[in-house]
């Protein structure tokens, strides 16, 4: 009896394990836009740099964020401050200036490029040469 009642009302029973898109044409489709995020290799590279800077006492905290346009790794000296640096990944700029950039707290872009390792070299300390 419940089957005929459902047919009269126009309901479609969907098992709970079915995805939301399988509910039929009467339901509006939600377009799920994928978020940009760092892949494992990129995170390993960034966290390796972060670990070195923490050991040197320069950095103490970090935060990560993602949206559909940009992935951000923010570095803090203290957790209550503004981020010292932001490491960003913007895939839409990959063919132009490069997908990766490092931005200072002032908003100045310190380095931009196509390869993350090259962009992160902005954090390497420059060795002083003694001239006789």
Image: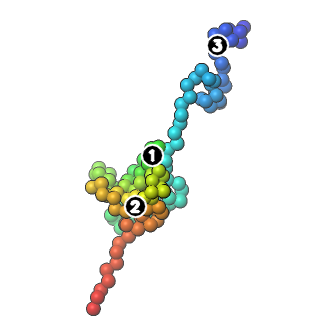
Q: Is residue 121 above or below residue 41?
A: below
Q: Are marks 2 and 3 in contact (CB under 8 Å)?
A: no
- Res 94 visible: yes
Could you say which disc has been placed on residue 112 in the image? 2
Closer-to-camera residue (15/117) = 117
Label 1's element? Answer: loop
- Neighbour class for label 3 at 10 Å: few (<14), some, many (≥20)? few
Label 3's element? Answer: loop
Q: Residue at x 51, y 39 (%)?
A: 33
Q: CA distance from mark 1 to mark 2?
A: 17 Å
Q: Earlier in the sequence, mark 2 or mark 3?
A: 3
- Neighbour class for label 1 at 10 Å: few (<14), some, many (≥20)? some
Residue 106 quadrant: bottom left
Q: Residue at x 48, y 52 (%)?
A: 91
Residue 128: image x %, image y %? 31, 80
Q: Which residue is mark 3?
A: 10
Label 2's element? Answer: strand
Q: Residue at x 49, y 44 (%)?
A: 35
Q: Earlier in the sequence, mark 1 or mark 2?
A: 1
- Taking the image as shown, residue 82 lies to the left or right of residue 5, namely left
- Taking the image as shown, residue 28 lies to the left or right of residue 124, namely right
Question: Which image quadrant: the N terminus?
Answer: top right
- Taking the image as shown, residue 126 lies to the left or right of residue 30, namely left
Q: Which residue is mark 1?
A: 69
Q: Earlier in the sequence, mark 1 or mark 3?
A: 3
Residue 110: image x %, image y %? 34, 62
């Amino acid at each position: 009896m419940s089957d005929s009642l459902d047919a009269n009302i126009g309901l479609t029973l969907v098992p709970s394990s079915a995805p939301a898109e399988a509910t039929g044409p009467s339901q509006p489709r939600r377009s799920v836009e994928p978020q940009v995020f760092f892949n494992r290799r990129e995170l390993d590279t960034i966290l390796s740099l972060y670990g070195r800077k923490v050991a040197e006492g320069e950095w103490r905290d970090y935060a990560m964020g993602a949206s559909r346009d940009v992935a951000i790794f923010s570095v803090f000296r203290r957790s209550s401050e503004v981020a010292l640096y932001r490491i960003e990944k913007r895939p839409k700029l990959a063919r132009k200036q490069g997908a990766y950039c490092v931005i200072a707290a002032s908003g100045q872009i310190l380095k931009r490029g196509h390869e993350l390792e090259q962009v992160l070299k902005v954090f390497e300390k420059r060795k002083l040469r003694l001239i006789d």
